[in-house]
Every structure is written in structure tokens, then in C-alpha cells.
Image (cartoon, rainbow, N blue to C red):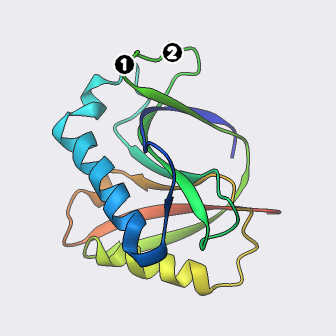
């Protein structure tokens, strides 16, 4: 997949999956994203899709990592001063589908990923929340896992 630019909110500092910390940290960032209507404040969005990105891994899923929520924008956009920017580099991906009732279907999908033999790169992994994920009782979320080779 080619590189692209996102504008939105970055979690201050890093988080970890240990003791459910990432669930609390990422959940709080989602709450802020929603309550402050961040998606509506992003100019020149290329779609209404929302990206949740896991990146800057210290090691693997057991280490610390950074988290970002935002929307895809034109590369030439000047980022509004109150928002953050994240450039996603060109990478190869394995795509996993989370399907079912939210947020349990996401938890199940990530457990499958962690237990799989996918040759993970631990680069920039992301979930795409599109029209297919609007109904939380029957959602579909594509999870893009960065891999070393196609």
C-alpha cells in the first residue's frame, strides 16, 4: 500500500497491552475524538473513514507503542494547529477482518493476530472504521497488519 497522511489526535506518550492499560488509554482518546467532534474539524478529508493506528513499537505486542486516531487527508494539507499529523509510510500488509458485535469482535481479532504466524513488521498497523462499522451490533472493521514481505 502506498504512503498516506492522517490528521487527528495522538495519544500523549506511549501505552502498553499490560494489565489492560492500552484499553483505557486508547478508549480515552476515542472518547475525546468523539466528544470534541475531531473528525468534523479535519479539513480536506479524502473520506469519512476513521483510522486507528498502532505504531512506534518498542518491540512487539508485549512492549509499549504509540496510538493515533484520525482521517486520511491530501498530502498537501497544512495541519490545523490543534491537531496532530501522522505520515504512514508505504508498507506491505496482511488484512484481518473483525466482524460481529463491537468491541468484542476487535478483541477477538487481535487475539487471533497475536496467536498467528503472520510475519509482523511492527511498523504501522491500523484499523479502518468505515460505513461497515457504524452498526455496533453487526460491525466490520478491516485491520491492516504491517508485514515484512507480501
Mark 2 to mark 1: distance in Å? 8 Å
Left or right? Give the position of 8 relative to 59. left
Residue at 38 percent across and 43 percent down: it is: 49
Residue at 47 percent across and 17 percent down: it is: 79
Residue 95 spot, x, y in % from top left: 59, 65
Other-residue count near label 1 (Cα within 10 Å), few / some / many at <14 / 14–19 / ≥20: some
What element does badge 1 sit on?
loop
- The residue that mark 1 highlights is 43
The image shows a total of numbered marks equal to 2
Left or right? Give the position of 136 relative to 76. left
Nearer to the camera, 36 or 58: 58
33 versus 100 height, above or below: above
Residue at 59 percent across and 80 percent down: it is: 114
149 versus 50 height, above or below: below
Q: Are marks 2 and 1 in contact (CB under 8 Å)?
A: yes
65 versus 43 height, above or below: below
- The residue that mark 2 highlights is 77
Residue at 67 percent across and 37 percent down: it is: 3
Mark found first going from the N terminus, 2 or 1: 1
Other-residue count near label 2 (Cα within 10 Å), few / some / many at <14 / 14–19 / ≥20: some
Q: Quarter of the image for the C terminus: give it.
A: bottom right
What element does badge 2 sit on?
loop
Nearer to the camera, 79 or 46: 79
Residue 34 spot, x, y in % from top left: 21, 43
Amino acid at each position: 500500500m502506498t504512503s498516506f497522511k492522517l490528521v487527528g489526535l495522538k495519544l500523549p506518550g506511549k501505552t502498553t497491552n499490560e494489565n489492560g492499560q492500552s484499553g483505557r488509554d486508547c478508549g480515552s482518546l476515542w472518547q475525546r475524538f468523539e466528544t470534541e467532534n475531531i473528525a468534523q474539524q479535519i479539513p480536506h478529508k479524502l473520506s469519512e473513514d476513521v483510522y486507528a493506528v498502532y505504531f512506534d513499537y518498542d518491540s512487539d505486542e508485549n512492549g509499549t507503542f504509540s496510538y493515533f486516531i484520525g482521517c486520511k487527508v491530501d498530502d498537501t494539507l497544512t495541519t490545523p494547529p490543534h491537531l496532530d499529523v501522522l505520515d504512514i509510510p508505504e508498507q506491505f500488509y496482511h488484512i484481518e477482518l473483525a466482524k460481529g458485535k463491537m468491541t468484542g469482535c476487535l478483541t477477538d481479532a487481535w487475539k487471533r493476530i497475536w496467536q498467528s504466524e503472520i510475519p509482523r513488521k511492527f511498523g504501522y498497523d491500523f484499523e479502518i472504521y468505515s460505513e461497515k462499522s457504524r452498526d455496533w451490533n453487526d460491525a466490520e472493521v478491516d485491520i491492516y497488519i504491517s508485514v515484512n514481505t507480501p
